């Protein structure tokens, strides 16, 4: 996406809110003689996708920003139908940042599934600051692995480890916490993005080992700028807004419901 | 004509530069939108701040929001840091804007409401007080509005506690919204605002659980617009017009056309809430559209449009 203002200011950890436009619901024409539409069929409908959808900034290239998204529901489906040259409304950059210190030993980046994209500009920033990093990337199965992104990380990180939950030739099988246990050294700082269960497991490992750990979290959002108080995460200092006080939280502050 | 249409309007003694008002709970405490490029608080005539209670409130468990067809269900639960913190941390910063700020009070008894009102009375940068007697997301939240006697008790207590113009915010769920509105006007309300959200439910069919942490939520957005418009029209004819009290109309306004509908139905000012989440620049576009309509219809005073709905004769 061409978005010079966002491209200029976006920092690792931040996201954008995209207006995904008009929802065109694929419809199977239902039997007009039947009294009720059959289960599984849909009414023909074209309706505006209402709220904006949040996506992490994956890559910045001059005046352009890139996101990588997976198709979940109507909003992401509409995004995937966009053609080059289409116009979308994008609000951003939003949210706080992944913080890192030039004094830290090494960054251990942990990504689960579609959690990979936001870590790229972090890996770039780390490298620019002469800091070492490794990427531990867990996916459910082979098709989920975002190959082009993995290649990008290979140029930035000292090491990239991919694990799959489904047994696959050429890949390590298991959960991401296993390579994490092996890789984590004193002084490493962990940056994790992924499903809630994974984040919690990673936070536990880092906590037990005494490593600092930052988590990029997700919650349903409406405004993205801190006014509606819908995207709350319970923390040691009460409810915090994911879209402004987050999406990055220090794992020690997060209270898991 | 050539001259720029004048969108200014008088609302309960407030001089609004535009008939557009940001709705409580969608605008934070007044300065959150100004960091968006191209947005200016002056795009609005006024902005209502998030509801304030006497003591801080933590709000409801998450999820607090779910998207529904052409709208959202929210169950925020009036989370706020309490009236003292709001007056201390936010209000002093709000000077220097051409847009006016309206505080919004919530309480669990008439006495509670009055205490909050009294604090805002002495606070800086507040031009009026909206009284939220209609929140569906807390215990007994709407009961103040749905019971005319209770509504009158709250508004009476608030009027005694402040000299600010008092706007009573009505629930669309009242058995008779005109009775509730009438009771508020008799108790001294300087204006009425309607509607707050409609109580609704969304279900996750896989888990058979409600989608929201609070189970139910309040519906807002275009989904409620025709319902809200009908109520504004009724309250205008039955209460507001006879009493000479203005209405601030809310309910799914996204475009200039929507805002014009509310004005014609009888609202003197139009609230914009949920639309701000979808398009923070909506107020600008709406103001431009109203200006164009005024030009096309040779209107030089917007107040001449208010309540001009041509009701058709029925048998
Ligand atoms: C800070 C942040 C960064 C994100 N970055 C990415 C990314 O880089 N790539 C990517 O593929 N996805 C990302 N997501 C998840 C993405 O926002 C959702 O997949 C998307 O909103 C789903 O919309 P939908 O209409 O397709 O799905 P639906 O399920 O139909 O959406 C219904 C509603 O639920 C909300 N919702 C659904 N899933 C999520 C979720 N996981 N988090 C928050 N809200 C959700 C939607 O926004 C929408 O309001 C991110 C989420 C957050 C909060
Ligand atoms: C997320 C959210 C929070 C709200 N919080 C409040 C509130 O604190 N106090 C209040 O009086 N109304 C609150 N409202 C109601 C709005 O002010 C408004 O009356 C309603 O949303 C209808 O207008 P709309 O369709 O333009 O949003 C809230 C609405 C939303 C969507
Ligand atoms: S999405 Fe509105 S406060 Fe975070």
Image (cartoon, coloured by chain):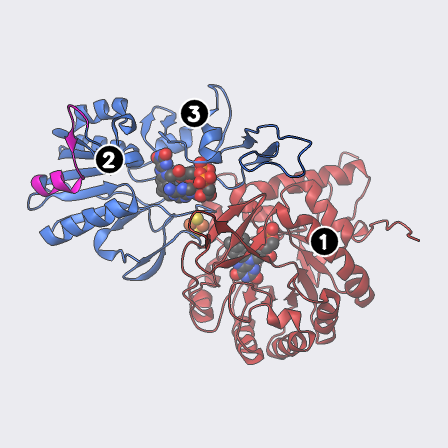
Mark toward the start of the polypeptide (3 vs 2): 3
Q: Secondary structure at mark 3?
A: loop
In this rendered view, identify the residue nearer to me: A60 or A228. A228
Q: Is mark 3 within 8 Å of ligand 1?
A: no
Is residue A11 found left or right of B208 in the rendered image?
left
Instruction: Report the residue marked by disc 1.
Output: B9
Near mark 2 (Cα within 10 A), the count class, few <14, some 14-19 or many ≥20, is many
Q: Colour of chain A?
A: blue
Instruction: Report the residue marked by disc 2.
Output: A122
* Residue B305 visible: yes
Which of label 1 and label 2 is nearer to you? Answer: 2
Specify the segment rendered in magenta.
A168-182
In this rendered view, identify the residue nearer to me: A252 or B219. B219
In this rendering, the answer to whether A117 lies above or below B224 is above
Instruction: Report the residue marked by disc 3.
Output: A2
Distance from disc 1 to disc 2, alpha carbons, whole Å, reads 51 Å
* Residue B46 visible: no
Q: Secondary structure at mark 1?
A: strand
Q: Chain of mark 2?
A: A
Q: Chain of mark 3?
A: A
Quadrant location of the N terminus of chain B in the rendered image: top right
Image chain in red: B
Q: Residue furthest top?
A: A84
Distance from disc 3 to disc 1, alpha carbons, whole Å, reads 40 Å
Distance from disc 3 to disc 2, alpha carbons, whole Å, reads 21 Å
Q: Chain of mark 1?
A: B
Residue at x-position 45% and y-position 63%: B79
Is residue B77 found left or right of A144 in the rendered image?
right
Tag count in the figure? 3
Find residue A22 and report its image quarter.
top right
């Amino acid at each position: 996406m061409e978005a010079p203002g966002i491209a200029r200011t976006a920092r690792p950890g931040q996201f954008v809110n995209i207006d995904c436009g008009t929802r065109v619901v694929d419809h199977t024409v239902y039997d007009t003689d039947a009294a009720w539409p059959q289960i599984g069929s849909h009414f023909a409908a074209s309706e505006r996708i209402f709220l904006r959808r949040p996506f992490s900034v994956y890559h910045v290239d001059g005046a352009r920003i890139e996101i990588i998204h997976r198709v979940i529901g109507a909003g992401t489906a509409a995004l995937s139908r966009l053609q080059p040259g289409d116009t979308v409304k994008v609000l951003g950059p939003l949210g706080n940042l992944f913080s890192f210190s030039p004094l830290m030993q090494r960054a251990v980046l942990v990504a689960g599934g579609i959690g990979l994209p936001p870590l790229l500009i972090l890996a770039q920033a780390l490298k620019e600051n002469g800091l070492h990093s490794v990427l531990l990337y867990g996916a459910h199965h082979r098709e989920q692995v975002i190959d082009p992104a993995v290649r990008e990380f290979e140029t930035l990180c000292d090491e990239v480890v991919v694990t799959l939950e489904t047994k696959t030739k050429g890949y390590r099988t298991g959960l991401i916490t296993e390579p994490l246990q092996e890789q984590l050294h004193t002084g490493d700082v962990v940056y994790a993005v992924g499903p809630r269960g994974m984040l919690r497991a990673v936070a536990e490992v880092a906590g037990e080992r005494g490593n600092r750990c930052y988590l990029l979290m997700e919650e349903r959002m409406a405004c993205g700028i801190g006014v509606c108080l819908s995207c709350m995460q319970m923390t040691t200092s009460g409810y915090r807004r994911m879209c402004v006080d987050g999406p990055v939280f220090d794992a020690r502050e997060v209270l898991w419901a | 004509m050539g001259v720029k249409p004048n969108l200014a309007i008088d609302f309960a003694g407030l001089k609004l530069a535009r008939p557009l008002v940001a709705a409580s709970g969608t605008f934070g405490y007044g300065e959150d939108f100004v960091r968006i490029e191209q947005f200016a608080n002056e795009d609005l005539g006024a902005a209502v701040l998030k509801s304030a209670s006497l003591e801080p409130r933590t709000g409801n468990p998450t999820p607090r929001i779910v998207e529904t067809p052409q709208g959202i269900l929210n169950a925020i639960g009036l989370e706020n840091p309490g009236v003292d913190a709001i007056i201390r941390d936010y209000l002093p910063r709000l000077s220097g804007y051409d847009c006016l700020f309206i505080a919004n009070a919530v309480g669990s008894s008439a006495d509670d409401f009055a205490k909050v009102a009294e604090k805002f009375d002495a606070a800086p940068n507040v031009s009026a007080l909206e009284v939220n007697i209609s929140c569906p997301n807390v215990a007994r939240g709407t009961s103040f509005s749905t019971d005319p006697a209770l509504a009158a008790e709250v508004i009476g207590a608030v009027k005694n506690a402040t000299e600010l113009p008092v706007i009573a915010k009505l629930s669309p769920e009242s058995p008779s919204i005109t009775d509730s509105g009438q009771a508020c006007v008799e108790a001294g309300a300087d204006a009425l605002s309607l509607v707050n959200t409609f109580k609704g439910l969304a279900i996750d069919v896989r888990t058979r659980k409600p989608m929201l942490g609070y189970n139910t939520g309040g519906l807002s957005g275009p989904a409620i617009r025709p319902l809200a418009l009908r109520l504004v029209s009724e309250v205008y004819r039955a209460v507001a017009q006879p009493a000479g009290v203005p209405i601030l109309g809310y309910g799914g306004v996204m475009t200039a056309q929507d805002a014009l509908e509310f004005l014609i139905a009888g609202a003197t000012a139009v609230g914009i809430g949920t639309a701000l989440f979808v398009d923070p620049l909506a107020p600008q576009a709406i103001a431009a559209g109203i200006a164009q309509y005024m030009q096309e219809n040779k209107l030089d005073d917007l107040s001449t449009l208010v309540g001009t709905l041509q009701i058709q004769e029925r048998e």
